[in-house]
Amino acid sequence: MARQLSRRKFVVYSLAASTLTVAAPLGCDATTAEGAEAADSAPRRPSDVLVTGTDEEMLVLEVTKANKVVVRLPRVEVGQGVTTAVAMMIAEELDARLADVDIPLADARTKGNQFTGGSSSVSSLYGPARELGALARAKLVTAAARRWRLPARTLKTRNTKVVAPDGRSATFGSLTASAARITRPAVSSRPKPASKHRVIGKATTRIDARDIVTGKAVYAGDLTVAGAKPTVVARPPTLGGKAVSVDSRAARAMPGVHAVVEIAGGVAVVADTFHHAFTARDALRITWAPGPLATLSDAAIRSRLRAAVPRLGTPPRGSTQTEAEFEFAFVSHAPMEVLTAVADVRATRAEIWFSSQTPMYARDSIASAVGLPESKVKVHVVRGGGSFGRRLNHDAAIEAALISKAARRPVKLMWSRADDIQHGRMRPASHHRIRASHARGRVVAFTHAMASVTEAFEAQGSSAQGLSAQGTAEGPGQGPAQALVTRAAARAAGPLPSGSGLYNFGRVSGDSGSVELAMPLGAWRSVDSGTMRTAEEIVVDEVARSLGKDPVAFRRTTLRNKAVKAVLDKVADAGHWGRTLPAGHAQGVAVHEEYGSRVACLVEIDAADPENPRVTKVVMAADVGTAVNPRGLEAQLMGAAIDGISTVLRAGLHIDEGAVRESSYADFAYARQRHAPLRFEAHIMPSRREPGGAGELGVPAAAGAVANAYARATGTRPRRFPLDF
């Protein structure tokens, strides 16, 4: 009886469906969607299901009557090109035109995996997306075969149509209703082998490129939500400072001002326009109590970090030591689009619009902050204009929700550039101590100990900083964002998985310490690898020098992995390693392996004026398995090169008596066009492996190569980054 009921429910849904809809589970073991069971007892692949209106835990594909293929993506687009990559996967398997594939962003769900981070989006979606496309194609072909009374195996698909041998064709949209009723396709629903790929692996312009350059693309700041008024916040001069007294009379009397609201992070002004809001904010008279770090500046933080680095222990007897210590400054994410969130909080429900890499955790945190059940809070995910890890946290969304609740009206909150640089998340400062022990011409032991600033939660509270109160496997009371930061501080313990375990260096070990400070920290590009690998690649160069060996030749003889050697060989050959350069110019090289991928970077630098170095050439080679969109990967590697140039040469944050000194791009000196390399090359290694991670892969290699090039050009040993600190 139970089986009959389940079959009836399935048939009723199939008959009622107006469009073909298929789904693949993401991050769960279920083989069918909720409310839909298999029509018979035959085993089915995870994607062979129909869904009854829910996309929880699912990647869902729908073919509409308008001949569009729509996939609601449980990830966020922040400029990394994930929507284009997924559209390419779907178009490949369906033989659809890329222009006919739409990839809207899914709202926050109640279960499943919506985490965008760790360079995992393409690799985690590659299988499900291709299975969806292949299954949908098989059902559409079967529907056409039944309509035309032809053998399904004789039909072809191209340009979002099914084509018969006699030239007849039918759009997918015209077949979608009948395809929705098919439970057993008459042709194979297996994804194509890599040898038959025509879209995957082809350099492709982003599907949203025209919208971005013409202003059609919609970001949170572009949204028009009924009644939502522009809102800004007056913030304390020091990190964690509090308002002691607020005189808002002048601000409230100004034209266009609707409300002045005190919140934990400062005082908010709600007005008719952002001009009115900023003007009124500047008219507030606020007395601030200093934050908990008001007596602390860079020198003291560096001293405490140095003291927190564990001892390296005793080196092997009879060995010679190459030792070095490195300091890395705090770094802002500084995405081009400032943090913006629209919030409409009512007595019984709330609705929020913003760009989030962790929308499920954001919803839970917002619900807790405004005192509503999670089921009554709806989060709409909006594309973001850059992130680099910043949108893992949801500070602005929580603030917008609290302001909306207090002001009793919808608000559009915008953090200014100064807000985000001076009060937003930042990469932790860290101190590294490395020792390479060598004897008889080879490294016999390698030790890397480090200490990083970690966030003191008891001083600020997780909800105030946009963190989830829900625990994760990484630690109690941590959402994914803070878990990544915690990992950055702890990952040095034991053998270094992203460190010099790349090399045959004998006994590899490490340890870590931390300095807890009440600072808003966040996961920044490559998290821990961006500093750890940079330091290690510098030491690898210095070991080679002490042994009288060329840096590339030394790496070739000591690298463990053939694939890493291959990318190193590629950049050395393409970049003409060892060529003669003028005085004050030099080459540098570094390698990295992470996310199931490998990368090498060769840099040429002009440091004839050591105070104003200029990277003139960058050559990168990457092995990421299948590169779904080589053009997108090249853009990622180019961005990584700029990150390496910036954080090694000039970009960092100073802490002066509890305050961040920098406040805009004018003094947070990220690389400009005049600092970009005159020549950039990216070489994508051919592979038929499934994709690995690529988004953050290139940063450590780029940073290490820039530092090594500068050291060789100037004859110095750089130890503090950025160099101008």
Image (cartoon, rainbow, N blue to C red):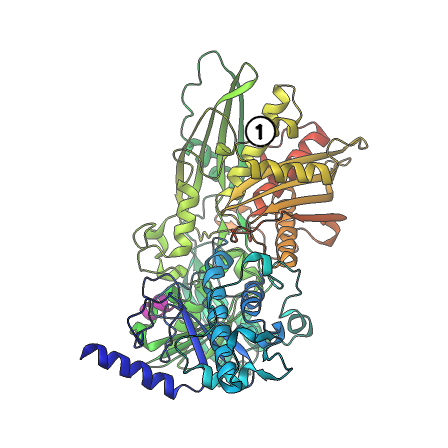
Residue identifier under label 1 = 540
Q: Residue furthest left?
A: 1
Q: Is residue 369 above or below residue 195?
A: below
On screen, residue 181 versus residue 272, left or right, reads left
Characterize the magenta stretch by its predominant secondary structure: helix
Say whether residue 366 is magenta.
yes
Say which amino acid is labelled 1. Val
Query: Image quadrant for the C terminus?
Result: top right
Q: Tell me which residue sits at (66%, 74%) in the image.
A: 215
Q: Residue furthest right?
A: 582
On screen, residue 699 versus residue 445, left or right, reads right
Query: Image quadrant for the N terminus?
Result: bottom left
Locate residue 93, reporting x and y percent. 54, 67
Q: Nearer the viewer, residue 197 or 222?
A: 197
Q: Secondary structure at mark 1?
A: helix
Q: Tell me which residue sits at (58%, 71%) in the image.
A: 95
Locate residue 592, reporting x and y percent. 56, 40
Tell me the magenta residue range: 363-368
The part of the image, by quadrant, that contains residue 581 is top right
Q: Nearer the viewer, residue 660 or 577?
A: 577
Q: Tell me which residue sits at (62%, 43%) in the image.
A: 702
On screen, residue 721 versus residue 402, left or right, reads right
Q: Nearer the viewer, residue 532 or 170?
A: 170
Q: Is residue 599 above or below residue 719?
A: below
Q: Is residue 140 visible?
A: yes
Q: Is residue 669 visible?
A: no
Locate residue 225, reporting x and y percent. 50, 82
Say whether residue 312 is magenta.
no
Q: Is residue 323 above or below residue 697?
A: above
The part of the image, by quadrant, that contains residue 221 is bottom right
Locate residue 365, reporting x and y percent. 35, 65
At label 1, counting other C-alpha atoms closer than 10 Å, the crowd grade (few under 14, some 14-19, many 20 or more) is many
